[in-house]
Image: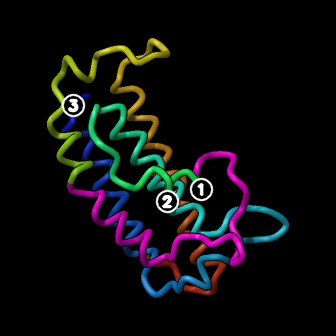
Amino acid sequence: MDGQLLSKIFEASHMSLTRNLEGITHEESLRAPEPGGNSLNWVLGHLLYHRNVVMKLLNRPPVWDPEKAARYARGSAPLGPDDHPQPLESIRAELDRSQAPLLEALRACTDEELAAPLENGNPRAQGLLQLGFHEGYHGGQISMLRRFLGYAGAIQ
Protein backbone atom coordinates (compact mmCIF):
# COMPACT_ATOMS: atom_id res chain seq x y z
CA MET A 1 0.00 0.00 0.00
CA ASP A 2 1.37 3.40 -0.91
CA GLY A 3 0.18 6.97 -0.57
CA GLN A 4 -0.65 7.24 -4.28
CA LEU A 5 -3.06 4.34 -4.00
CA LEU A 6 -4.58 5.69 -0.78
CA SER A 7 -5.17 9.04 -2.46
CA LYS A 8 -7.29 7.31 -5.13
CA ILE A 9 -9.88 6.42 -2.47
CA PHE A 10 -10.33 10.08 -1.59
CA GLU A 11 -10.30 11.18 -5.24
CA ALA A 12 -13.17 8.84 -6.05
CA SER A 13 -15.01 9.84 -2.90
CA HIS A 14 -14.76 13.55 -3.69
CA MET A 15 -16.06 13.00 -7.23
CA SER A 16 -19.02 11.00 -5.92
CA LEU A 17 -19.80 13.48 -3.15
CA THR A 18 -19.66 16.43 -5.54
CA ARG A 19 -22.15 14.80 -7.88
CA ASN A 20 -24.47 13.65 -5.10
CA LEU A 21 -24.59 17.10 -3.52
CA GLU A 22 -25.63 18.88 -6.73
CA GLY A 23 -28.85 20.83 -6.35
CA ILE A 24 -29.39 20.13 -2.64
CA THR A 25 -30.23 23.19 -0.56
CA HIS A 26 -29.21 23.93 2.99
CA GLU A 27 -32.79 23.54 4.18
CA GLU A 28 -33.08 20.14 2.50
CA SER A 29 -29.76 19.09 4.02
CA LEU A 30 -31.29 19.38 7.49
CA ARG A 31 -34.09 16.87 6.83
CA ALA A 32 -33.41 13.52 8.46
CA PRO A 33 -35.08 10.21 7.68
CA GLU A 34 -37.52 8.93 10.27
CA PRO A 35 -37.61 7.01 12.58
CA GLY A 36 -33.94 7.81 12.93
CA GLY A 37 -30.80 8.68 11.10
CA ASN A 38 -28.76 11.75 10.50
CA SER A 39 -29.34 14.54 8.05
CA LEU A 40 -27.18 15.03 4.99
CA ASN A 41 -25.73 18.15 6.64
CA TRP A 42 -24.54 16.11 9.61
CA VAL A 43 -23.16 13.26 7.48
CA LEU A 44 -21.18 15.65 5.25
CA GLY A 45 -19.84 17.55 8.26
CA HIS A 46 -18.93 14.19 9.82
CA LEU A 47 -16.89 13.29 6.73
CA LEU A 48 -15.06 16.58 6.91
CA TYR A 49 -14.46 16.07 10.65
CA HIS A 50 -12.79 12.78 9.80
CA ARG A 51 -10.62 14.39 7.14
CA ASN A 52 -9.08 16.22 10.11
CA VAL A 53 -8.43 12.79 11.65
CA VAL A 54 -6.67 11.70 8.43
CA MET A 55 -4.52 14.82 8.54
CA LYS A 56 -3.66 14.20 12.20
CA LEU A 57 -2.51 10.67 11.33
CA LEU A 58 -0.29 12.26 8.68
CA ASN A 59 1.07 14.86 11.12
CA ARG A 60 -0.47 17.69 9.11
CA PRO A 61 -2.65 20.60 10.18
CA PRO A 62 -6.43 20.14 10.15
CA VAL A 63 -8.32 20.95 6.97
CA TRP A 64 -11.41 22.29 8.79
CA ASP A 65 -11.72 24.51 11.84
CA PRO A 66 -11.71 22.04 14.76
CA GLU A 67 -14.35 24.05 16.64
CA LYS A 68 -16.79 23.82 13.72
CA ALA A 69 -15.85 20.18 13.12
CA ALA A 70 -16.50 19.16 16.74
CA ARG A 71 -20.27 19.48 16.23
CA TYR A 72 -20.06 16.66 13.69
CA ALA A 73 -18.03 14.19 15.75
CA ARG A 74 -19.20 10.62 16.19
CA GLY A 75 -21.93 10.40 18.81
CA SER A 76 -22.93 14.05 18.53
CA ALA A 77 -26.63 14.84 18.62
CA PRO A 78 -28.61 14.99 15.39
CA LEU A 79 -28.87 18.43 13.82
CA GLY A 80 -31.99 20.49 13.42
CA PRO A 81 -32.56 24.04 12.18
CA ASP A 82 -32.46 25.37 15.76
CA ASP A 83 -29.03 23.82 16.40
CA HIS A 84 -27.22 26.43 14.28
CA PRO A 85 -25.68 23.92 11.87
CA GLN A 86 -23.00 25.02 9.47
CA PRO A 87 -24.54 26.11 6.15
CA LEU A 88 -24.37 23.31 3.62
CA GLU A 89 -22.59 25.54 1.09
CA SER A 90 -19.94 26.30 3.70
CA ILE A 91 -19.36 22.62 4.42
CA ARG A 92 -19.19 21.88 0.69
CA ALA A 93 -16.65 24.68 0.20
CA GLU A 94 -14.56 23.34 3.08
CA LEU A 95 -14.74 19.83 1.58
CA ASP A 96 -13.47 21.20 -1.73
CA ARG A 97 -10.69 23.16 0.03
CA SER A 98 -9.68 20.05 1.97
CA GLN A 99 -9.13 17.98 -1.15
CA ALA A 100 -5.76 19.31 -2.34
CA PRO A 101 -3.99 19.26 1.05
CA LEU A 102 -5.43 15.82 1.81
CA LEU A 103 -4.24 14.32 -1.48
CA GLU A 104 -0.87 16.04 -1.19
CA ALA A 105 -0.37 14.63 2.30
CA LEU A 106 -1.33 11.11 1.25
CA ARG A 107 0.85 11.15 -1.87
CA ALA A 108 3.84 12.37 0.14
CA CYS A 109 3.73 9.39 2.53
CA THR A 110 6.80 7.21 2.50
CA ASP A 111 6.72 3.46 2.98
CA GLU A 112 8.29 3.98 6.40
CA GLU A 113 5.60 6.47 7.44
CA LEU A 114 2.84 4.13 6.30
CA ALA A 115 4.36 1.21 8.18
CA ALA A 116 4.86 3.20 11.41
CA PRO A 117 2.64 1.96 14.23
CA LEU A 118 -0.22 4.05 15.55
CA GLU A 119 -1.13 4.25 19.24
CA ASN A 120 -3.22 1.09 18.85
CA GLY A 121 -0.25 -0.77 17.36
CA ASN A 122 -1.69 -1.00 13.85
CA PRO A 123 0.31 0.41 10.95
CA ARG A 124 -0.59 3.93 9.83
CA ALA A 125 -1.62 2.56 6.42
CA GLN A 126 -4.30 0.44 8.09
CA GLY A 127 -5.72 3.46 9.91
CA LEU A 128 -5.78 5.43 6.66
CA LEU A 129 -7.51 2.58 4.84
CA GLN A 130 -10.15 2.42 7.56
CA LEU A 131 -10.74 6.16 7.23
CA GLY A 132 -11.00 5.79 3.46
CA PHE A 133 -13.62 3.08 3.95
CA HIS A 134 -15.38 5.32 6.48
CA GLU A 135 -15.60 8.11 3.92
CA GLY A 136 -16.97 5.73 1.30
CA TYR A 137 -19.52 4.34 3.75
CA HIS A 138 -20.90 7.76 4.58
CA GLY A 139 -20.66 8.83 0.95
CA GLY A 140 -23.10 6.01 0.21
CA GLN A 141 -25.39 7.37 2.90
CA ILE A 142 -25.29 10.77 1.20
CA SER A 143 -26.32 9.08 -2.04
CA MET A 144 -29.31 7.52 -0.26
CA LEU A 145 -30.16 10.79 1.50
CA ARG A 146 -30.21 12.45 -1.92
CA ARG A 147 -32.88 9.92 -2.95
CA PHE A 148 -34.71 10.46 0.35
CA LEU A 149 -34.90 14.17 -0.52
CA GLY A 150 -36.60 13.29 -3.80
CA TYR A 151 -33.67 13.66 -6.20
CA ALA A 152 -32.68 11.15 -8.84
CA GLY A 153 -29.49 9.23 -8.30
CA ALA A 154 -26.48 11.27 -9.36
CA ILE A 155 -24.32 8.39 -10.53
CA GLN A 156 -25.89 6.04 -13.04
Give above or below for 22 relative to 59. Answer: below
Q: Residue at x 56, y 85 (%)?
A: 151
Q: Write the residue at 37% across / 18% down.
A: 123
Q: Amino acid at mark 1?
A: Arg
Of badges 1 and 3, nearer the viewer stands 1
Circle 3 SS class: loop
The secondary element bearing badge 2 is classed as helix
Outermost residue toward the right in this view: 35
Q: CA–CA distance between discs 3 and 2?
A: 23 Å
User: Which image quarter is the N terminus in?
Assistant: top left
> For mark 2, what is the residue?
139
Q: Is residue 116 left or right of residue 152?
A: left
Residue 106 screen position, x and y as percent: 23, 39
Pointer 3 residue: 2
Name the residue beneath numbered marker 1: 71
User: Is residue 83 found left or right of 56 in the rendered image?
Assistant: right
Question: Which is nearer the N-term, disc 3 or disc 2?
Answer: 3
At label 1, counting other C-alpha atoms closer than 10 Å, the crowd grade (few under 14, some 14-19, many 20 or more) is many
Gap between marks 1 and 3 measured at Cα: 32 Å
| Image quarter hosting the C terminus | bottom left
In this view of the protein, which residue sits in the foreground, 12 or 92?
A: 92
For the residue carrying disc 2, how many other residues have a C-alpha within 10 Å: few (<14), some (14-19), or many (20+)? Answer: many
Query: Which residue is at a point 49% across and 59% down the rendered structure image?
Result: 139
Instruction: Name the amino acid type tagged 2.
Output: Gly
Q: Which residues are magenta?
A: 73-100
Given this view, does label 2 or label 1 mark the residue nearer the observer?
1
